[in-house]
Image (cartoon, rainbow, N blue to C red):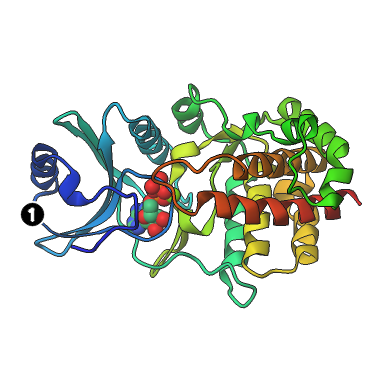
């Protein structure tokens, strides 16, 4: 059994009753459990290998842990996505010993390569176009109906405007009011009927050896305007080495963001404000690297925002 990244629960941390329940449900003993690198969660998220060589992916946590609600939401979403959506199937949900496990079909491969040399970004933009080009189907709407959109509530420039942090770049400080106004427009534009993954980054995708790129970690899935995932993806590509000008151009042209440019700009402002604000908060336990990532994301997000509004 491999050592998980810092802060992650391991398979052996799961109560034996739940481990036994899973082995019974899956029909064979677990012979290996590998926790993939990446992600910021603290729950168990592991690829299990069974005695008969089949593999499954499982997420588990104590039932009263807030991550359990997120895992259950993800299970419901995976069971409701339209055929052909880039997502793994849900296999089962199990409760035992005060814990809950969601079992998901295993994907075999690395995270996609977001760098400019890779064909993965092109494939991902095509998947996003397909995913958002028509309204979400009814089962999906029902699965996400009681889950508020996390993206709709993002903000941060308002707080930076009220109390500008000393380490804010002078160029950002000069435009604080403008950024805060753009962000303030976002909540009214945040509604829509499209499937929104809500947390698209390389570590929430797997380039499966047979299926190509598949989106995982649907815990934040909701409905909204088509631009949310496209705008979220854009700074990730700049962080991976794409020139900001190229990505700004792509956002101008991609159907998911080109059809609602005002919403796309307002959401980019809200997202970057959220990153700037959170990057300056004390680090939460069990999520090493999160604040440093938010600082980097805030910087490239603001560069993209400037390119959109200059
Ligand atoms: N179905 C799957 N098959 C194989 N690996 C997966 C699967 N789903 C997720 N992963 C891998 O596990 C990691 C953590 O899973 P994820 O669903 O993102 O959980 P978390 O909420 O903890 O970030 C992902 O970054 C990815 O590398
Ligand atoms: Mg994740």
* Figure check: 119 above or below 13: below
* Figure check: 77 above or below 142: below
Q: List the single residue furthest toward the top.
A: 146
Quarter of the image where one finds residue 54: bottom left
Residue 254: x and y in percent read 73, 55
Is 259 on the left-hand or right-hand side of 41? right
Q: Quadrant of the N terminus?
A: bottom left
Q: Choose between 261 and 86: the one closer to the eye.
A: 261
* Figure check: 29 above or below 211: above
Q: List the single residue furthest toward the right.
A: 310
Question: Residue at image x 45%, y 43%?
Answer: 218
* Figure check: 146 above or below 26: above
Residue 215: x and y in percent read 47, 53
Query: How packed is label 1: few (under 14 Cα within 10 Å), some, or many (20 or more)?
Result: some
Quarter of the image where one finds residue 187: top right
Residue hosting label 1: 29
Number of numbered markers: 1
Is 165 on the left-hand or right-hand side of 141? right
Question: Residue at image x 72%, y 31%?
Answer: 159
Residue 24: x and y in percent read 8, 44
Q: Secondary structure at mark 1?
A: loop
Question: Residue at image x 60%, y 71%?
Answer: 115
Q: Is mark 1 within 8 Å of ligand 1?
A: no
Q: List the single residue furthest toward the front.
A: 166
Residue 247: x and y in percent read 74, 61
Q: Choose between 133 and 273: the one closer to the eye.
A: 273
């Amino acid at each position: 059994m491999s050592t998980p990244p810092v802060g992650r629960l391991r398979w052996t941390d799961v109560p034996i009753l739940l481990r036994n329940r899973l082995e019974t449900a899956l029909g064979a003993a677990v012979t290996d459990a590998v926790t993939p690198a990446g992600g910021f969660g603290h729950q168990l998220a592991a690829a299990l290998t069974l005695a008969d060589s089949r593999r499954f992916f499982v997420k588990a946590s104590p039932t009263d842990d807030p991550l359990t609600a997120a895992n259950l939401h993800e299970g419901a979403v995976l069971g409701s996505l339209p055929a052909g959506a880039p997502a793994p199937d849900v296999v089962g949900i199990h409760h035992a010993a005060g814990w809950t496990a969601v079992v998901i079909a295993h994907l075999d491969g690395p995270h996609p390569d977001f760098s400019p040399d890779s064909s993965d970004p092109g494939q991902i933009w095509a998947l996003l176009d397909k995913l958002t080009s028509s309204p979400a189907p009814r089962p999906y709407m029902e699965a996400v109906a009681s889950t508020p959109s996390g993206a709709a509530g993002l903000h941060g420039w308002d707080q930076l405007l009220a109390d500008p942090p000393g380490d804010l770049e002078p160029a950002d400080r000069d435009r604080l009011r403008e950024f805060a106004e753009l962000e303030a427009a976002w909540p009214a534009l945040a509604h829509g009927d499209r499937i929104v993954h809500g947390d698209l980054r390389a570590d929430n995708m797997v380039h499966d050896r047979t299926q190509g790129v598949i989106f995982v970690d649907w815990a934040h899935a909701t409905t909204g305007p088509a631009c949310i995932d496209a705008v979220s993806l854009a700074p990730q590509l700049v962080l991976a080495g794409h020139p900001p000008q190229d990505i700004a151009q792509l956002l101008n042209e991609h159907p998911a963001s080109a059809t609602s440019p005002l919403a796309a700009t307002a959401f980019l402002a809200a997202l970057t404000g959220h990153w700037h604000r959170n990057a300056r908060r004390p680090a939460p336990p069990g999520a090493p690297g999160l604040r440093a990532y938010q600082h980097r994301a805030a910087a490239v997000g603001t560069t993209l925002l400037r390119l959109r509004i200059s």
